[in-house]
Amino acid sequence: MTVVSQDDVTGESWEHVTLGQRVLFGTGRAAAHVAAEVDRLGARRVLVVGAAFPEVTAGLDVVARVADVRQHVPVADAERARAMAAESRADLLVSVGGGSTTGLAKAVALTTGVPVVAVPTTFAGSEATNVWGLTEASRKTTGADDRVLPVTVVYDAALTLSLPTELAIASGCNALAHCVDSMWAPRTDPIDQALAAEGIRALSGGLRLVRADPGGLEGRERTLYGAYLAAVAFSSAGSGLHHKICHVLGGAYGLPHAATHTAVLPYVLAFNAPAAPEAARRITAALGGDLFSLYDELGAAHSLRDTGLARESLAEAARLVLPAVPPSNPRPAGESDLLTLLTAAWNGDRPEWSLA
């Protein structure tokens, strides 16, 4: 008998967890798909989260509606929505809206266990993750809990037509950030990286079509598909440096979510790429070029200054981000590195980097 010591073991070793979720994709079919899911789940008392798109839930037995939704899910909003769920004895949450709407529904599910059917109207991707976030006293806390993962996601590209082109592009760039972070996040594995690469291809192609034809459905369908892949990869891989930075900025300074992610992404990519050349090559190949050139094509805003962040807050922001930097980040990031990164993002300077 041959005994193999741990030192003799070579090759890849990783663990991948796929979250269980039903996905229904069909343009113009949101209302039918939601009604079918309510029946399948046996729900009788539906609490709707989100004020827009009442036609999606018009045929349901809606016992209450939470219409007041704010970015970054303030704890006070979550507590009010939880109280409404308890008072109405809701047995299903149906969220119709963007990432903030999904996030509020998740906050209710986190403490009540009431399942969620999510109907996204942006490309945020929150609907495909078990990640929740709450903000209190200018600090955003995030975590992962399978109770908040929507049991079903209903995708309907027609619902995204209400997004103005600039917001659609910012939302799609937020999805790109999920993909890029998934290439080197703490729990990344080859499956996450494959999903992320395909997500980047779908998103970059879809967003180009959205820019060329804002009222067309093909680009929005492709972008929705890419946003889902991005979120699945991100849910498994975890939050990398990019998302840690953006969560701190969003919670501390109340910055717009998608615009902040759009602004920060090129600079995190430029910072990490030299230390993760294979990931950087895959990202570049999937983009069909460099990220900043794609931004130029799309007319995507790429300055933290444009989000409303004051220049004098950059040093404080770097200090706040430092404790959240993942130890597994491809390149160590000290406070001075973070300040340099944030300053470049604030200025909107074109980041320069090359692979060894």
Image (cartoon, helix red, strand yellow):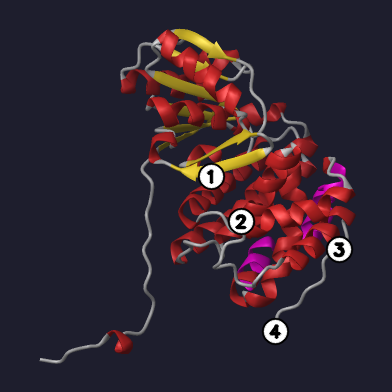
Labelled pair 3, 1 in contact (Cβ < 8 Å): no
* Quadrant including the N terminus: bottom left
Q: Is mark 1 on a helix, strand or loop?
A: helix
Mark 1 and mark 2: span between their CA atoms? Answer: 26 Å
Which of these two is toward me, 331 or 225? 331
Query: Which residue lies under the disc numbered 2?
Result: 324
* Vertical comparison of 280 with 197: above or below: below
Residues packed near mark 3 inside 10 Å, few (<14), some (14 to 19) or many (20 plus): some
Which mark, by number, is residue 350?
3
Mark 4 and mark 2: span between their CA atoms? Answer: 28 Å
Q: Is any atom of residue 289 visible in this view?
A: no
Query: Which one is earlier in the sequence, the residue at label 4 or at label 1?
Result: 1
Query: Which residue lies under the disc numbered 4?
Result: 356
Query: Which one is earlier in the sequence, the residue at label 2 or at label 3?
Result: 2
Q: Is the magenta stretch mostly helix, strand or loop?
A: helix
Residues packed near mark 4 inside 10 Å, few (<14), some (14 to 19) or many (20 plus): few
Give the x, y percent position of residue 130.
46, 42
Q: What element carries label 2?
A: helix
Query: Which one is earlier in the sequence, the residue at label 4 or at label 2?
Result: 2
Query: Which residue lies under the disc numbered 1?
Result: 228
Count of numbered labels shown in the rendering: 4
- Residue stretch rendered in magenta on the structure: 281-306
Which residue is pictured at 78% across the width and 74% down the height? 353
